[in-house]
Amino acid sequence: MKTIAFHNLGCKVNSYELDVMQQIMQEKGYEIVPFDKKADVYVINTCTVTNIADRKSRQMLHRAKQKNPDAVVVAVGCYVQTDLAGATADPAIDLAIGNNRKKDIAEILEQYLAEREKNLEVAGGKGVCKTGELADGGWVGKTGNVAEGGEICCGAPDKTLGGMTVLDIAHEKEYEEMQLKTTAEHTRAYIKIQDGCNQFCSYCAIPLARGRVRSRKQEDVLKEIRGIVDAGYLEIVLTGIHVSSYGIDFEKADGNAKGADSTKNGGIAKLSQGTSPDAGGKSAGGEKENGAMDYRGVTKLFDLIEEIHKIPGLQRIRISSLEPRIVTPETAKRLAALPKVCPHFHLSLQSGCDATLRRMNRHYTAQQYFESVQALRDAYAPRVPAITTDVIAGFPGETEEEFAETKAFLEKVGFYEMHVFKYSKRKGTRAAVMDGQVPETVKALRSDVLLELERKQSMEFRSRKLGQVVEVLMEEEKVIGGKNYLLGHTTDYVRAALLLPGNGATLDHGATPKGKPGAGAELPQDAGKMARAGEILKLELLDFLTEDILLGRETNLF
């Protein structure tokens, strides 16, 4: 039995796709082994959202080849899509597969292995290249991969199988349908509902990597979720590249998407050399992508959520991210009317300064963003929904005054969590060629300021949870401070812990005041008795166990 190891980098969409690829290869008879073990095939699902992501992708590819030089190392996804020349020139990579072809991984790999076997003849323990010559230290041939000694081994097939494995993603119109049956997580499943993005924020390379919006048919989404629930999962997270664009590409209200299926006969479509969006934000067809076409007061996302809500056995629905412009008093009320929808919403901000937002091509003002947050808070009152966001520090042209404006806006909103990123220049984007590039030292300082604000706001949000009785989906056991706990998340994604039996009745983490990490708390001797991962428990939140985990005890109160 051939062994195969997987490693994922990047977003939850990548995680979903990796789970499906693992499922496909297992069904083909491969044995899945840990990535740090020796394997016949290594698959790295790459990311390109930042320069660091690119570098990590290359590092993991090289690590795989070092682990087993004879293995087939497969680079998959966004890094391949945006830097095909770099991927094919990398001697650590044997096979490159772009986006919208991940479902074909088994067929692609089988074709690669068959061509390699056909091309490479063994004579006297040395490889013979059919279209080249045997040379000292390796093979010299006309086409193929780099072999030992840095020469070209034409026994190894072309890394894209002649352009069959990487498409011109800008012209792909069909959603790549996959069906997930199980995941590495035992309680929560990520469900991909769309791919691609039409927004073209000036700093972002993702539309170049993922193409235009392609939505999944509602019937396929519902079928997958029903299967996941039947497998025992209680919570799903709706994910995509730009989730709020779900359905904008549907031609009819019945959920049928535009575009023909380029692979419906089972073939692997050939690479076409088209143009991707230019730095001015125009599509390959020349149409201006200003974002206005995506939102005209109608979205099919909420229709989909309402249908998902009807599925028996499903307990929780999360939405990975929302476009601020689709959150209105009306849509917020629709969400609040659905008990299974978790009051935890990620609204990506990026900057609290209108001038910076315009340079980012974000299509809303800080005040409009604030109104969207307020619509959610009003709809859920007296409950307080958790609002999280992304912020970029040091965007080109960001002055000290603009940064101060952003910081003041973040303080005004009051988030549960903020993901703070230092601006990373991405090739092919408008921001990469803008004047006023901010020095790395300044980016770092601004990032540190925002991270400290994030820590303060997160602590404040968690502190307000103390004394509340909440439902926690228990997910995993973990040792903290030498004691065993069962950990999970509340509906608003606050991490909570329950002491497991055999640890004693008293948790003594130091004589610090209540509401501060390390405070002690009295628990009954049978705390956590019979509790296990996969259950939803009612916990009274007592204190901080760590800075980001609240300590709870089981209760019948609610």
Image: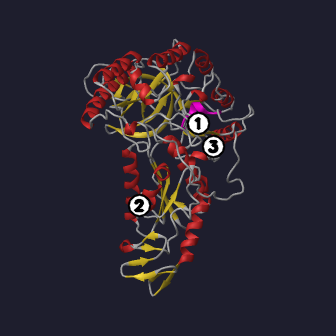
Find residue 64 and name its label.
2
Q: CA distance from mark 3 to mark 2?
A: 33 Å
Q: CA distance from mark 3 to mark 1?
A: 45 Å
Camera-nearest residue between 101 and 478: 101
Camera-nearest residue between 482 and 41: 41
Q: Is residue 6 left or right of residue 62?
A: right
- Would you call the spot at circle 2 few (<14 residues within 10 Å), some (14-19), or many (20 or more)? many
- Residue 172 in picture, x, y percent from top left: 62, 47
In the rendered image, which residue does mark 1 sit on?
Answer: 287
Q: Secondary structure at mark 3?
A: loop
In the rendered image, which residue does mark 3 sit on?
Answer: 231
Picture residue at 42% right of the left edge, 19% below the top: 465
Q: Is residue 501 visible?
A: no
Is 107 included in the stretch rendered in magenta?
no
Contact between labelled residues 1 and 3, with CB atoms less than 8 Å apart: no
- Residue 439 in picture, x, y percent from top left: 26, 36
Find residue 257 and name its label.
none
Q: Earlier in the sequence, mark 3 or mark 1?
A: 3
On screen, residue 146 above or below 468: below
Contact between labelled residues 2 and 3, with CB atoms less than 8 Å apart: no
Question: Which residue appears farthest toward the front when viewing the image?
Answer: 286
Q: Which residues are magenta?
A: 233-247
Q: Amino acid at mark 1?
A: Glu
Q: In which quarter of the view is residue 124 placed?
A: bottom left
